[in-house]
Amino acid sequence: MDLNIIEIFFKIGRNLALTPTTTHNFKVTLSQRIYKVLVFIFFTVGATAGFQYRLFAYITYPLIEAFLWIFTDVTRYVHNLYIFLSVMIFKRKFWFVLFTNLRKPNIAIGHSEDKSLYFKFIVTYFCYIFIYSCIFFVLYNTIDLYEFVRLYFVEFVQIFTQFFYLSFAPIILKMILLRYQHFKNTLHLQKNWHQIKINQLQLKQTVDTFCEIFGGTILLNIIYNSSKSLIYVNKMIKEVHTPSYNSPILVLTKVTHVGILGLFWALIFWVIFLCDAIVSENEEITKKVQKLLQTDLILYDNKQFENFLKAVTSNGPKFSAARFFLIKRSTIFQIINSLVTFLIVIIQIKTESLV
């Protein structure tokens, strides 16, 4: 059953209070509340201390670079704040609404699809572990343990929370997509239009619930990765003419930077394409319903079918990033356009400062 993989994510996420302990943990115990508070304090104190240490370096940077570094630190912490306050307190009930809806369509997931979910999960985490192993190797050869703990330890844990939600979101989206595909493929076998309408509305509710949980994390990860990309591009341009540009450690550092950004962007784009695929499936369902109507003229006088048709056409899935914008294929071009625009602004500012 494809829902078993959710339990794996929960076993990972509960260690940092990122998810409920299990899919049946409806009530929060006192010990769980205390643990969440301790984890939140850990992130808050650690992020604040790390920011203060790095602030001494930031004030030596040019203004635009300092702003981008500070902005990424703030965004990273806001991501944790969103998870602990919004997702795990105010929206905690949505986790169980999501799982209930995913269980309701009694569909048989093919063995290949089930294996595909686990394979993608393993590959994603392997890439993350490999890239961060390289990062730890670089840091081991450049700074001592005290500097690492003081500057990067909490930051790396924060980045893992971002990765956790980014890797979890496409798995849930793939499950939703499989249910839309099942709904479309079995549509011609259904006779009770009212029940079909209920199933379609449940799928729509599943999409809305997904957006309530993951929409904010997707938005914050897009913002974070966009600013990080600008920082690294600017840094690479600046270091091209430095004497140590081709040193092995510096090259490995750049490769790891590109690797982690590439992994995060790949996950973001995967989320976007899956959202678009689900919307496309619903459009196919609408076309199929209209085709059924054309082939069976008796349905014109069927009130249940008329209500169903209205439900399908007016309750299509819409994915939003915390209601700031809709997530669709064109979002990729909007991200690229924004990055190019900001990069041009940075280059212009640096050019004017040299004149």
Image (cartoon, helix red, strand yellow):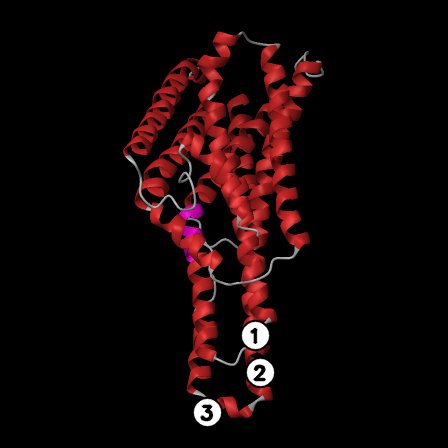
Q: In the current view of this chain or complex, which residue is farthest to the left?
A: 30
Q: Is residue 6 above or below residue 107?
A: above
**Residue type at numbered disc 1:** Leu
Local secondary structure at mark 2: helix
Local secondary structure at mark 1: helix
Residue 140 shown in magenta: no
In the visual, does 277 lie left or right of 43? Answer: right
Say few, some or many: other residues with alpha carbon within 10 Å of mark 3 (under 14 / 14 to 19 / 20 or more).
few
User: Do callouts 2 and 1 mark residues in contact (Cβ within 8 Å)?
Assistant: yes
Q: Which residues are magenta?
A: 208-215
Q: Quadrant of the C terminus?
A: top right
List the residue tagged with mark 1: 187
List the residue tagged with mark 2: 292
Mark-to-mark CA distance, 1 and 3: 19 Å
Say few, some or many: other residues with alpha carbon within 10 Å of mark 2 (under 14 / 14 to 19 / 20 or more).
some
Q: Which mark is residue 301?
A: 3
Is the stretch drawn in magenta largely helix, strand or loop? helix
